[in-house]
């Protein structure tokens, strides 16, 4: 009986309509949270209150469906996304009132939007790729910091007297260089220094080349490479392994042998 119920829950979890409904509820949850940031009428507040109760109960039902549909229950918590969803749902059960936990409950309800990632496989691949790329990006960030530090020191020494507000010390100079890298009115900074040092445009051109162009392409290349690896892993998961193919082949041979024996009789 329990096994038949588990299979029914598994079929429900795999049902495309059910998945679409879950995504719809997540979107409605996000809109409901956004609506609460406006001044609402008492009627609208009452509607959002009952809607929040429905969303919370539905998420509890959905997480229970996913949990009980697992053949081995402990495998459910091996997935980080399942653990995250469970924590969000459990904390969402905290009633929003004037208690000390009210702020935590409101904040967690905001994070319910992130459940969209655990539902849609493509979003999971993107997030997993970013997480896998972080160690490799660390070296790029370190190299970028070195470039920032060198250029900030040079800029502080050369341009301190021109504009102390922008080049007063190395820390302020690094903030100024970040503004240059993001192209936020950087030409105003350049023309100001070029009035004293006409060749200072080389300082800005080389810095922009290293940071905005070279390093940005390096970051994109790393993320794209990791994303290709993650997509390849997902494809391998969906494809049957050699052992599974051998088992299926043995099963087919056994069925064929049974049919042959029947024909002989």
Image (cartoon, helix red, strand yellow):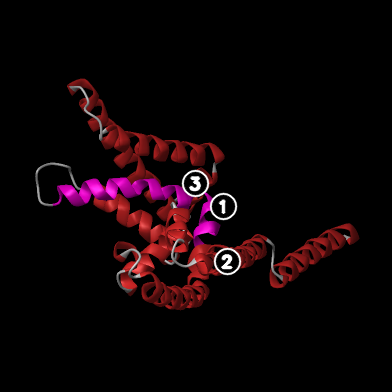
The Cα atoms of the two marked residues, 3 and 2, are separated by 50 Å
Q: Which of marks 3 and 2 is in front?
A: 2
User: Residue 13 got which mark?
Assistant: 3
> What residue would you read off at disc 2?
209
Residue 14 at x, y percent in the picture: 54, 46
User: Main SS type for the magenta part?
Assistant: helix
Residue 197 at x, y percent in the picture: 47, 67
Mark 3, residues whose alpha carbon is within 10 Å: few (<14), some, or many (≥20)? some
- Is 155 part of what is drawn in magenta? no
Which region is colored magenta? 101-128
> What residue would you read off at disc 1?
122
Q: Which of marks 1 and 3 is in front?
A: 1
Mark 2, residues whose alpha carbon is within 10 Å: few (<14), some, or many (≥20)? few
Residue 178 at x, y percent in the picture: 42, 63
Give the quarter of the image for residue 26: top left
Q: Nearer the viewer, mark 1 or mark 2?
A: 2
Q: Which residue is drawn at 25% across and 31% down?
A: 38
In the image, 18 versus 122, the foreground residue is: 122
Depicted 94 relative to depicted 197: above or below: above
Q: Which residue is drawn at 40% across and 50% down?
A: 114
Depicted 49 relative to depicted 16: above or below: above
Disc nearer the start of the sequence (3/2): 3
In the image, 58 versus 25, the foreground residue is: 25
Horizontal side of residue 119 vs 261, given as left or right: left
Q: Is residue 93 visible?
A: no
Q: Residue at x 32, y 71 (%)?
A: 171
Depicted 152 relative to depicted 108: above or below: below
* Circles 3 and 2: CB atoms closer than 8 Å: no
User: Residue 132 got which mark?
Assistant: none
């Amino acid at each position: 009986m329990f096994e038949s119920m588990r299979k029914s829950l598994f079929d429900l979890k795999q049902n495309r309509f059910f998945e679409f409904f879950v995504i719809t509820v997540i979107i409605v949850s996000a809109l409901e949270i956004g609506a609460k940031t406006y001044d609402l009428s008492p009627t609208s507040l009452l509607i959002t209150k009952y809607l929040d109760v429905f969303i919370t109960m539905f998420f509890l039902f959905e997480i229970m469906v996913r949990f009980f549909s697992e053949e081995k229950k402990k495998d459910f918590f091996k997935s980080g996304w399942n653990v995250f969803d469970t924590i969000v749902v459990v904390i969402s059960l905290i009633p929003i009132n004037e208690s000390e936990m009210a702020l935590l409950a409101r904040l967690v309800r905001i994070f319910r939007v992130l459940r969209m990632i655990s539902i849609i496989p493509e979003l999971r691949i993107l997030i997993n790729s970013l997480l896998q790329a972080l160690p490799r990006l660390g070296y790029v960030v370190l190299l970028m910091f070195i470039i920032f530090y060198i250029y900030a020191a040079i800029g502080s020494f050369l341009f301190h007297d021109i504009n102390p507000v922008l080049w007063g010390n190395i820390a302020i100079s690094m903030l100024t260089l970040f503004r240059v890298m993001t192209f936020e009115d950087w030409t105003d900074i350049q023309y100001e220094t070029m009035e004293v040092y006409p060749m200072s445009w080389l300082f800005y051109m080389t810095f922009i080349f290293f940071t905005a162009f070279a390093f940005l392409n390096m970051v994109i290349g790393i993320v794209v490479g990791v994303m290709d690896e993650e997509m390849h892993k997902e494809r391998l998961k969906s494809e049957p392994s050699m052992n599974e193919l051998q088992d299926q082949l043995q099963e087919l041979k056994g069925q064929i042998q049974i049919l042959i024996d029947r024909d002989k009789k």
